[in-house]
Amino acid sequence: MRIRIVGAGAMGRGIAQWAASAGHTVELGDVRTEAVREAVDFVRSMLDRAVAKDRMSAEDSAAAVARLVPLDDPWAPGPDVELVVEAVREDLDTKAEVFGRLAQVLPASTVFATNTSSLSVTRIAATLDDPSRLAGLHFFNPVPLMRIVEVVPGAATRPEIPAALTELVEGCGHRAVTVSDTPGFLVNHAGRGLVTEALALLEESVARPVDIDRIARDVLGLRMGPFELMDLTGLDVTAAVIDSIWQGFRHEPRLRPSYLTPNRVAAGLHGRKTGQGWYAYGPEVEDTVEEPVTGDADRAVHVPGDGADARALREALTAAGARVRDDLSPEAVVLVPVWGTSVADAVAGQGLPAARTFGVDPLSLAGGRRVLSVTPAADPAAARDARAVLARADRAVTLVRDTAGSVAQRLLASVVSVAASIAERSLATPADIDLAVTLGLGYPVGPLAWGDRIGAARLLELQRALHTTTGDPRYRPTRWVAERAALGLPLTAAGTSPEDCAG
């Protein structure tokens, strides 16, 4: 196939390297001719690096470079061009001008694809005389390494085009997911679950960014915590995406932005690229170390209740050699496993001693970090002792402010809820949601499969408890989870639709 790429910046040159390496002839154009030359040199250097690392033969590298065709004029006639991929800046008027000029010089059969990440594909297509020829083809940076591409049909896109683009993407070694033309498409939409909830936790002073990141990594298994991720991406970029998706979905509470971000963006605290974000960066910046454990690890502990979480907590403490007492003795600290509720509710509901009662997140029992919730009524010395007890057997322990569900549960519930809302709107299939998120965001497992690990019924219990305790519509149960909990279906199952029964 002969492909023309217009826009020779980071995305354009990445797409060019990807397509040329897969055997396609790639024309590369830009209004800045020097950008084309720089892009070709960059692709050549990347392919040379691949050869040096034995990821590609020298012959294949040379052949890929030979398939790159630099254009002096991006609007040059191209009778043999079958596909155009536009990769210019995120501006509707600019993209409309690009496709308008290309429509004048390329055959009517040439398919147009926009690499937009935030604009409506339908609105871009509507600027053309023939909107049916255009679809979205959203790559992620760096293109050769991020092996997921979103295929986005516009409202008027010809039905055969998404299938053809999917075949092209997968023939070049990447995975393709078909998603609806909605704000954020799939990956950026799904990614709002983690960062918006992390910001909400910070708003409420539940924990510091470093503590939320530690919990996200060590309890949930994420490669990066949400604040580390925002610093890497750039808070200016993240905040703009959060706002645009929230506005695009008409102020959906699950996607609600934080008041914390506008001032930080205005102050230039964008993250790594500015040297200061949620963290400071530079050669003289010291790593953040955890506070030492100073309490009495031999203090007696009592775990009330006989539910599965209480039994699991008692077993974990006993295995670590803690002094677990069956009775609520005057000297024992009380550890309550919380699931969607708060320690304060447990104190009030069970008549527990407020000064020495603390919460433990059941999600944190299996890994190397445990999470201890502290209420405003807690005795600091008792809190230090509770932390020391939990830290037995070389476990790290993070102290957080008491909140419904604690940190990990709220992050996980938000990730799954946003993904479930995507599924219930039929914006993408459950399989594509999980595939796109694992490849595009690097989560250890797709959000719906993650929910299945918890179980639909238990996840529904968490959603209901969070909603009841907080009264915030952000946490209302999703229909997707409620139905599957009632019917005994996994969250990853698309299930039967009325269309399946029509014929």
Image (cartoon, rainbow, N blue to C red):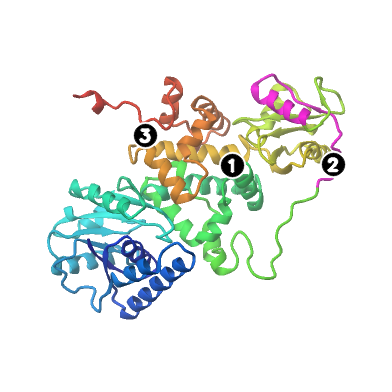
* 438 is higher (above) or lower (below) than 473: below
Q: Secondary structure at mark 2?
A: loop
Q: What residue sits right under mark 1 in the picture?
A: 220
3D distance between C-alphas at marks 3 and 2: 48 Å
Q: Secondary structure at mark 3?
A: helix
Report the residue at 46% width, 46% height from top: 438
Closer to the observer: label 3 or label 1?
1
* 299 is higher (above) or lower (below) than 351: below
Amino acid type assigned to the residue bearing label 2 in the image: Gly
* 449 is higher (above) or lower (below) than 192: above
Q: Residues within 10 Å of mark 2 (few under 14, many from 20)?
A: some
Q: Earlier in the sequence, mark 1 or mark 2?
A: 1
Q: Which residues are magenta?
A: 293-319
Picture quarter with the N terminus: bottom left
Task: Left or right? Give the position of 305 relative to 259.
Answer: right
Q: Secondary structure at mark 1?
A: loop
Q: Is residue 301 magenta?
A: yes
Task: Left or right? Give the position of 331 relative to 459.
Answer: right
Report the label total: 3
Residue 51 x, y percent position in the rendering: 44, 67
Q: Is residue 163 magenta?
A: no
Q: Are marks 1 and 2 in contact (CB under 8 Å)?
A: no
Q: What residue sits right under mark 2 in the picture?
A: 295
Residue sitting nearer the eye, 139 or 347? 139
Residue 399 visible, this orientation: yes
Q: What residue sits right under mark 3 in the picture?
A: 424
* 399 is higher (above) or lower (below) than 51: above
Amino acid type assigned to the residue bearing label 3 in the image: Glu
3D distance between C-alphas at marks 1 and 2: 26 Å
Q: Are marks 3 and 2 in contact (CB under 8 Å)?
A: no
Residue 235 visible, this orientation: no
